[in-house]
Image (spheres, rainbow, N blue to C red):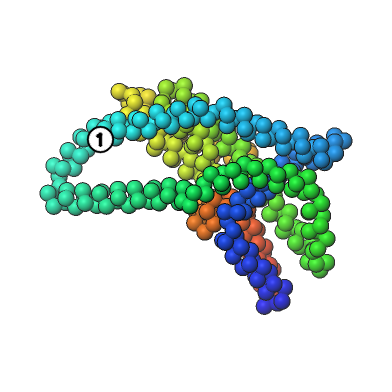
Amino acid sequence: MTPAVKAWLAGLAVFAALLFLLSDVLLPFVAGMGVAYFLDPVADKVEKWGVSRMLATVIILAAFFIVAIAGIILLFPLIQAQVVGLAARIPQLVVAIRHQAEPLLATLQASLTEQQIGELRQAAGSYAGDVIGWIGGILAGLLSGGLALFKLASLLVITPVVSFYLLRDWDRIIAHVNSLLPPGQASTIRRLTAEIDDTIAGFVRGQASVCLILGVYYGIALSLAGLESGLLVGFGAGLISFIPYIGASVGLLVGVAIAIAQFPDWLPVFLVAGIFIAGQVAESYVLTPKLVGDRVGLHPVWIIFALLAGGTLFDFTGVLLAVPAAAVIGVLVRFGQARYLELGQGDG
């Protein structure tokens, strides 16, 4: 193993250790870096119009955060009301689902023995307890230590500041890092970096557009279909659509469950299911190919694994870093595979 490889591995180990220890502190900085990276192409275009980088940064960030805050202010009361309404309907939802399931349960009860029924009840109670404990653990983790409010405040205050300085100095930072590259490997590193940037940009910017379009579509379509809490369910399903197939699946299950409890017949239930099926078809065959494209090179299974691993190891900071890390690893693996095949052909 060469000294350069040892140095890179040591640096990676130190970075992972610091990320694990400081994941909560790093969250606003990682979020600010993401905002700056997302808006850098816009700043470059504004600069081409003759506007200084400083003024372009101020205008772009002001517009970005004004739109974001305005959207939160406008949507929060409506979403809050839908959350309260959905929570109030949970007992009715349970009763409606039980009523719909009674014929199936009667059939199963007729075909099973008393011992088998008892085992099923015991297993169901055990799994229900595990699920409730898991949800309670998540809520306790979010609220533990009394730091939730402080973390939220730091995210809201520090993220815009970090975004401003990084977006303003983005080109200078890239130029400085570029000057530190070893001359012998500079061209290879630049090529790999450009491929990583293309992969991350294609996924993050493209997938953000896909999530926004799906959230608006699901929210409006479910509201027009008359589903209670339709905006909440639809917008939430759109937001989590960056996890392949999960957004539509979760939205389908929740939406259909609410529809069963709300509507007396099955036609509106099928309509709600059709909305999510149509959204998934549009995402798979229209939105993702057009807005994300095939150049990303990140398999859906690899993305899901990266998100789960990042969240498990480094909390929400790990979730934000999961896709960039997956892109870096994917590009390096493809590069190593290509080099291995080249060496194999040379030996042959």
Instruction: Determine the residue located farthest toward the front in the rendered image.
Output: 146
Occupied quadrant, residue 8: bottom right
Question: What is the tally of numbered marks visible in this picture?
Answer: 1
Against 81, residue 195 (above or below) is: below
Q: What amino acid does circle 1 point to?
A: Arg
Instruction: Determine the residue located farthest toward the right in the rendered image.
Output: 50
- Please state which of residues 276 and 317 is positioned toward the viewer in this rendering: 317
Please identify the quadrant where the C terminus is shown. Answer: bottom right
Where residue 103 appears, as percent x and y from the top left, is 20, 34
- Please state which of residues 276 and 89 is positioned toward the viewer in this rendering: 89
Please identify the quadrant where the N terminus is shown. Answer: bottom right
| Residue receiving disc 1 | 98
Instruction: Find numbered disc 1 in the image and state the secondary structure of the residue it sits on.
Output: helix
Where residue 204 appears, as percent x and y from the top left, is 63, 45
Against 61, residue 17 (above or below) is: below
Occupied quadrant, residue 259: top left
Mark 1 is surrounded, within 10 Å at the Cα level, by few (under 14), some (14 to 19) or many (20 or more) other residues, namely some
- Please state which of residues 34 and 151 is positioned toward the viewer in this rendering: 151
Residue plotted at (48% across, 43% down)? 245
Where residue 347 appears, as percent x and y from the top left, is 69, 76
- Please state which of residues 342 and 209 is positioned toward the viewer in this rendering: 209
Residue plotted at (54% across, 57% down)? 314
Where residue 167 appears, as percent x and y from the top left, is 75, 45
Query: Can the viewer see residue 96?
Result: yes
Residue plotted at (53% across, 30% down)? 76
Instruction: Determine the residue located farthest toward the left in the rendered image.
Output: 114
- Horizontally, is 95 left or right of 107 in the view? right
- Horizontally, is 49 left or right of 238 in the view? right
Residue plotted at (80% across, 67% down)? 182
Query: Can the viewer see residue 306?
Result: no
